[in-house]
Image (spheres, helix red, strand yellow):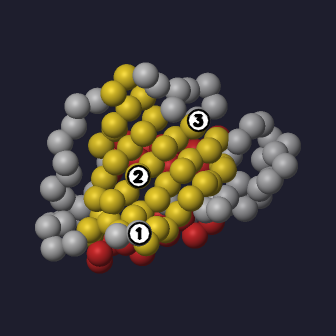
Amino acid sequence: MAFTPCAVHGAKYSGGANTFFLRLVDRGNAIGGKIQTCAKCATIIADRLASRMVKVSEGDEFTDYTEPLACSNCGGDVSSGAFAFFGNAYLRGHPETQWYGKVCVACRDAVAADFSLGAAR
């Protein structure tokens, strides 16, 4: 049984925690932080990261990537302003994975809710 409940669904769970550091950042303003989840919720968050963001590294392997030109959530234009979205995933039994994306101003609150950033410490 985990000492703290899952940050996503709020219930205690058996097994070790999976940890994410997720932040939306705009000129010094940041939303997010550390989130610890059960295995099921970790898989959901990791799948969302993989489908919406660019993988920067996995373990000691770094990926060549280009600067995102579109919102990681809606695919819209980010040239008029965007939040940088950083995600580090520490899944049990897997190497650390780092993700990067941009989120338009209109999608900021939806992304924060979708990734449980309000539960971050």
Image depth: mark 2 or mark 3 in front: 2
Q: CA distance from mark 2 to mark 3?
A: 16 Å
Image-based side of 7 in relation to 13, left or right: left
Residue type (three-letter) at the residue carrying disc 3? Leu
Residue tagged 1:
28
Q: CA distance from mark 2 to mark 1?
A: 14 Å
Name the mark on residue 63: none
Question: Residue 44 location in percent, x, y?
Answer: 51, 48
* Secondary element type, mark 3: loop
Nearest the viewer among 89 and 41 is: 89
User: Looking at the rendering, in which quadrant would you find the C terminus?
Assistant: bottom right
The answer, for residue 111, to whether it is visible in the render is no
Residue tagged 3:
91
Nearest the viewer among 59 and 109 is: 59
Image-based side of 114 in relation to 79, left or right: right
Q: Quadrant of residue 18?
A: top right
Question: Residue 48 location in percent, x, y?
Answer: 42, 50
Q: CA distance from mark 3 to mark 1?
A: 28 Å
Residue type (three-letter) at the residue carrying disc 1? Gly
Residue tagged 2:
86
Residue appearing at x 80%, y 41% in the figure: 14
